[in-house]
Image (tube, rainbow, N blue to C red):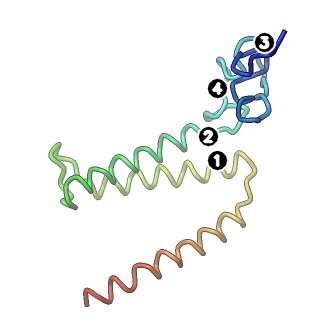
Amino acid sequence: MTHDPHERGEGEVCASVAGLPPLPSVGLTGGSPLEGSGDFSIGGALWPGVSKLIEEAGEVIQVAGKLLGSRGVEVHWDGSNLRERLEEEIADLLAACVFVVEENGLDRDAIDGRAERKLALFQGWQRPKTEERA
């Protein structure tokens, strides 16, 4: 009998097609490794907070898209202020980032170092544009 790599068995997922190990069955009594586990969500056992991180990132993208669509006009057609909404969603995203870092034991020093380097790069890109406008 040959094994179908697409078949989902106990403790296995389709990740085997990509050569990845099966997902762990964290605290489950059967079924899919993720079924009913709450993994990736706040309170989950596996990468807690990652789903919230994705949600908050999506909300930042949504508001940024509205700013693009309105050509930078801050008052949206629905009456909301896109600047205020962007500030709120960025705050929510930052909170989700800190939560994921803390709850998953990520290296805060490495993250902060990379963020500082990336910020310096972005600022370097912006300076010539600002100087051109002056």
Q: Is residue 83 above or below residue 36?
A: below
Q: Amino acid at mark 4?
A: Gly
Q: Is residue 1 left or right of residue 128?
A: right
In three-dimensional space, the C-alpha distance between marks 4 and 2, rounded to whole angstroms, equals 10 Å
Q: Amino acid at mark 3?
A: Thr
In three-dimensional space, the C-alpha distance between marks 1 and 3, rounded to whole angstroms, equals 27 Å
Q: Going from the N terminus, do you reach mark 4 or mark 2 first?
A: 4
In three-dimensional space, the C-alpha distance between marks 2 and 3, rounded to whole angstroms, equals 23 Å
The quarter of the rendered structure image containing the C terminus is: bottom left
In three-dimensional space, the C-alpha distance between marks 1 and 2, rounded to whole angstroms, equals 5 Å
Q: Position of residue 112 (x, y in %)?
A: 65, 67
Q: Going from the N terminus, do you reach mark 1 or mark 2 first?
A: 2
Residue 38 shows which numbered tag?
4
Q: Going from the N terminus, do you reach mark 2 or mark 3 first?
A: 3
Tag 1 near tag 4, CB within 8 Å = no
Tag 2 near tag 3, CB within 8 Å = no
Residue 52 shows which numbered tag?
none
Tag 1 near tag 2, CB within 8 Å = yes
Residue 29 lies in what quarter of the image?
top right
Q: Amino acid at mark 2?
A: Gly
Q: Secondary structure at mark 4?
A: loop
Location of mark 2 (residue): 49
Q: Residues within 10 Å of mark 1 (few under 14, many from 20)?
A: many
Q: Secondary structure at mark 3?
A: loop
Q: How many marks?
A: 4
Location of mark 1 (residue): 100
Q: Going from the N terminus, do you reach mark 4 or mark 3 first?
A: 3
Location of mark 3 (residue): 29
Q: Position of residue 17 (x, y in %)?
A: 71, 30
